[in-house]
Amino acid sequence: MKQQTKLLKTEEGLALVSDELKLIGDYSSLLPRVSNNRVQGEMLVKAVRMKGQSDLFVLDGTAGLGEDSFLLAAAGNRVLLCEYNDVIYSLLKDTHHRALLDERLTEIAKRMELYHGDSMSLMLDWAKGNCPLGNERKTPDVILLDPMFPAKTKHSLTNKKLQLFQSLESPCRTGEELFEAAMALKPKKIVVKRPLKGECLASRKPGYSISGKTVRFDCFVF
Ligand SMILES: C[S@@+](CC[C@H](N)C(=O)[O-])C[C@H]1O[C@@H](n2cnc3c(N)ncnc32)[C@H](O)[C@@H]1O
């Protein structure tokens, strides 16, 4: 059953609350994972990495609260974060804004640019030469896709953030279209985050995968 949620301004930042849960984005909690160059050991960072190329431009087509994007930005990449859900975008914007004001996070947050809208339309328009952000924009080297997991994976049931997200957003039913739109933009690589035992997005077999305890990154290199 979907939970009733509302947005509340709190001292810590904008929060999404339900009777049982409270969700506030906070990139400072990721500092232990990124400091002393530890971030280079993150599975996601390894999945996005491309031999001989640094400072990649990554499009995160399913930004959520931007934690994955934060890790990528901490590793030195520039990241464009797309989020279409109004409530989640408000939380993302507030989290990013607070990070810009926090001197421990400013430099990383500056490498993150937010876009409120549907990444599928953005990618298709961009591929046709009509980028809503300006036609002079370089297309992304890498596209990251992390559409909502189906509700009953072990990971989603034990993850409070996912429970609240699922109260706002249905599991993705447009995996094929999302993947096709990403392909249209001709990136060098597409990385798809999946539950460890989940099916491949749009039934596409990746070139290789990097797996952890609960999630897997499927990598498609072109
Ligand atoms: C599982 S969450 C992503 C979590 C994210 N990787 C993080 O680190 O916080 C999926 C998010 O993608 C968003 N989303 C799904 N399809 C989208 C689309 N076509 N365009 C923009 N946002 C999308 C959903 O609203 C949801 O917030």
Image (cartoon, helix red, strand yellow):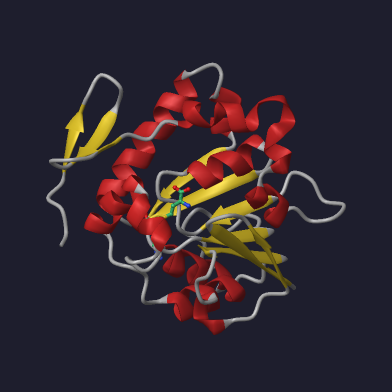
Classify residue 22 as left or right of residue 156: left
Q: Does 212 appear above or below 204?
A: above
Q: How many numbered marks have been drawn onto this rendered protein structure?
A: 0
Position in image of residue 75 (x %, y %): 68, 38
Give 126 or 33, whichever is nearer the viewer: 33
Residue for point 82% across, 51% down? 53
Does 157 sit left or right of 120 as displayed? left
Question: Residue drawn 15% across and 46% down?
Answer: 5
Name above or below for residue 24 compared with residue 44.
Answer: above
Q: Position of residue 157 (x, y in %)?
A: 33, 57
Out of 122 and 195, give the one closest to the viewer: 195
Q: In which quarter of the image is the N terminus?
A: bottom left
Between residue 138 and residue 219, name the one nearer to us.
219
Question: Which image quadrant for residue 50?
Answer: bottom right
* In this picture, residue 221 sits left or right of residue 96: right
Q: Position of residue 164 (x, y in %)?
A: 26, 50
Q: In which quarter of the image is ligand 1?
A: bottom left
Residue at the location (70% across, 33% down)? 38
Q: Residue pushed farthest bottom?
A: 203
Residue closest to the eye, 216 or 27: 216
Q: Can residue 139 be seen in this view?
A: no
| Residue 70, position as x, y percentages in the image | 55, 39
Q: Which residue lies furthest to the top in this view?
A: 103
Question: Which image quadrant: the C terminus?
Answer: bottom right
- Residue 97, visible in the rendered structure: yes
Residue at the image position 22 percent from the left and 40 percent from the top: 21
